[in-house]
Image (spheres, rainbow, N blue to C red):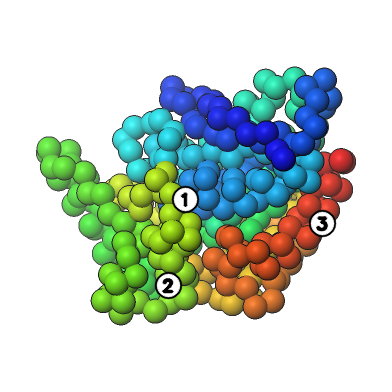
Amino acid sequence: MSQIESISFKNRTWDVAGTLRLPEGFDPNRKYAAIVCGHPISSCKEQTSGAIYGEALTRAGFITLAFDASTQGASGGEPRFLEDPATRTEDFRCAVDYLLTLPYVDEERIGVLGVCGGGGYAVSAATTDRRFKAVGTVVAANYGRLMREGDMSPDVVDKTLEAIAQQRTAEARGAEPAIVGYIPNSIEEREKAGIDDIDIVEAVEYYRTPRGQQAGSPNKLRFTSTGAAMNWDAFAFTEQLLTQPLHIVIGDVPGGFGSYRDGYDLYRRARTTTKTLQVVKGATHYDLYDQPEATSKALEQLIPFFNKHLDT
C-alpha cells in the first residue's frame, strides 16, 4: 500500500493543501520520479485526481502530489471560490517548487497529469515550466473555450460579461459576493431545469451523490471570477512552447463540456512530436473520472507513458 501524507506548500502568501503519496517500500535514500496530479474544475484532491489517478500512479512506483486549488477545498487564499486561470496554473508551478525541496524526488523526472479543467491548467503550466518532463491529460477541457461558448446562444459572451460587470460594481459598493453553482445541486434540480446533456447529467451524479461527493467540492463558484477565463485559452502557445512528451486520453462519447474535441484540438496544436491520443471506446467524460473499466484503460497507457518518459 502507498503511504499517504497531508502536506502544504505556498502559492504567494497562502498555503495550498496537498496529499503526497509515497510508493510501497518507499526508501528516503532513493531518488523517485514524481507526478503532480491536478483536479477538475469544481473538484478536490480527494476525488479523481488523487483517489483514482494519484493512487494508481503511486501503486505503479511514482510519488504523486494531488492538491486543492487555491481558494478552494482545504487550501488557503482569498477571496474564496475563485476559478482564476492564472492562479490555478501557478498552483502547478508551486507544486513543483515543493517537490524539489524533497531530497528523494529526482528533479529530472517530474511529470504532470490533469483531469478535465485540471488537464487544461496542466498543459498551460507545462508550456512555460520545463521542469515538467512529461504531460498527461484525461478528458482535458479548455475552460476558456467553454466559458466563451456557454449555452451556445449568439450573444452569451456579451450577456455574461455585462452581468459580471454589474456584479463587480455592486460588490464594490458593498453588496454581498455572488456565489453560484457550477452545476445543479441535485438530480431533482437538474430534472426540473430540463437539462439532459450527458456531461451535466453525469456531473450531478458524480459531484452531488455519494458516488463522488466530498466536502472539499461544495459546488460553489464566485461569479465575478469567471470573467478571467473569457479571454484565456488553456492551449495558448502550445504550437510554439509545448515540447514535452504528451499523452491525451479522451472518451468517444461527446458531451457539452467538449473534452472530446478539445483532445483532438490539443493533439493537433501541440508542438511536440512525441504525442499520442488515446480514445477510450464507449467512455463518457465522467466514466474516466472513476469507473473502473474506463480508468483502467486510461492507466494501461498512462503508466507506460510516464515510465518511458520519466525513465523509471
Mark 1, residue position: 43
Q: On the rendered image, what quadrant is the N terminus found in?
A: top right
The kind of residue on which mark 2 rests is: Val
Query: How many C-alpha atoms fall within 10 Å of the one at disc 1: few (<14), some, or many (≥20)?
Result: many
**In front here: 144 or 42?**
42
Q: Position of residue 304 (x, y in %)?
A: 83, 53
The kind of residue on which mark 3 rests is: Thr
| Sequence-first tag of 2 and 3 | 2
**In front here: 263 or 106?**
106
Q: Secondary structure at mark 3?
A: loop
Q: Residue at x 70, y 49 (%)?
A: 56
Query: How many C-alpha atoms fall within 10 Å of the one at disc 2: few (<14), some, or many (≥20)?
Result: some
Reply above or below: 277 against 240.
below
| Sequence-first tag of 3 and 1 | 1
Q: Secondary structure at mark 2?
A: helix
Task: Report how far apart the C-alphas of labels 2 and 3 lie in the structure.
Answer: 36 Å
Reply above or below: 60 against 14.
below
Reply above or below: 80 against 104.
below
Mark 2, residue position: 201
The kind of residue on which mark 1 rests is: Ser
Q: Is residue 273 visible?
A: yes
